[in-house]
Amino acid sequence: MALEQKELDQKPGAGLDSSLIRTGSSCQNPGCDAVYQGPENDATPCTYHPGAPRFHEGMKSWSCCGIQTLDFGAFLAQPGCRVGRHDWGKQLPASCRHDWHQTDSLVVVTVYGQIPLPAFNWVKASQTELHVHLVFDGNRVFQAEMKLWGVINVEQSSVSLMPSRVEISLVKADPGSWAQLEHPDALAEKARTGVVLEMDEEESEDSDDDLSWTEEEEEEEEEEAMGE
């Protein structure tokens, strides 16, 4: 599966199977008061607040738009400031083991989780940024946003979905070694805001060819998953 070119805004509500959504379910995105009546509701825009609520000295606001009010009812009634997709059911954050390794021309980010759901997953990138949204069996979600150490060739990069993991293969624009996966400025900002995505680099002497997956290897993975 090819890596999708930049369109990096996070998309809420990566999607539940419509057969699992109960009629009358409210959209879970803050600021949206839509109620699910049928699949046609998925086509309507969701206007929501992507940020967090802030309360300071009696003032109430959302971190995404900063409109302050003293009245709690007015705060709850503030219209959203971003348009996205409805989220009809709460998705559970997935605590997935993840790591990365590299060769001279390739960086591979691996996220481990049982049964990724292709219809609900997306991985998007620019030459220097990577945004990941993965939904695994049980409606568990792994999300990450990274400013990369180096520059990648988006068109040549790809994503592979397997029964027990997802591999994101990033082709380096210029051959060479990366000191780490993320740019130090991005790591410093995450540390300052308390958002840290820890990824350990694994030592690898594999060639680029060793990083590709054959159909036989995928079948072996599927047989192992079915036998568990």
Image (cartoon, rainbow, N blue to C red):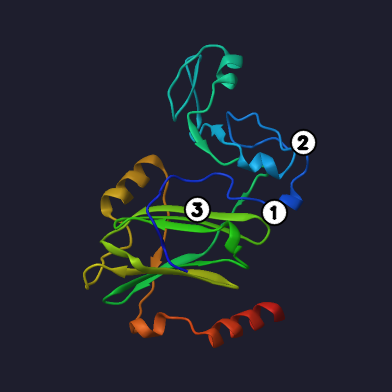
Location of residue 153 in the rendering, given as x and y in whole percent from the top left corner:
30, 65
Secondary element at tag 1: loop
Q: Amino acid at mark 1?
A: Asp
Query: Would residue 128 appear left or right of 65 to someone viewing this image?
Result: left
What is the CA distance from the residue labelled 3 to the residue labelled 2?
A: 28 Å
Location of residue 1 in the rendering, given as x and y in whole percent from the top left corner:
47, 69
- The residue at the point 32 percent across, 70 percent down is 171
When the figure is inspected, residue 61 is found, relative to residue 129, above or below; the finding is: above
Task: Inspect this view and state whether residue 167 appears.
Answer: yes
Residues 162 and 142: in front is 162
Residue to which mark 3 is pinned: 143
- The residue at the point 66 percent across, 32 percent down is 34
Q: Amino acid at mark 2?
A: Gly
Task: Inspect this view and state whether residue 169 appears.
Answer: no
| Residue ranking furthest to the top | 70
When the figure is inspected, residue 181 is found, relative to residue 87, above or below; the finding is: below
Quarter containing the C terminus:
bottom right
Query: Would residue 94 appear left or right of 26 to someone viewing this image?
Result: left
Local crowd at mark 1 within 10 Å, few (<14), some, or many (≥20)?
few
Residue to which mark 2 is pinned: 24
When the figure is inspected, residue 25 is found, relative to residue 59, above or below; the finding is: below
Local crowd at mark 2 within 10 Å, few (<14), some, or many (≥20)?
few
**Of the residues under marks 1 and 3, which one precedes in the sequence?**
1
When the figure is inspected, residue 85 is found, relative to residue 152, above or below; the finding is: above
Residues 181 and 223: in front is 223
Secondary element at tag 3: strand
Residue to which mark 1 is pinned: 17
Q: Amino acid at mark 3?
A: Gln
Location of residue 115 in the rendering, given as x and y in whole percent from the top left corner:
63, 68
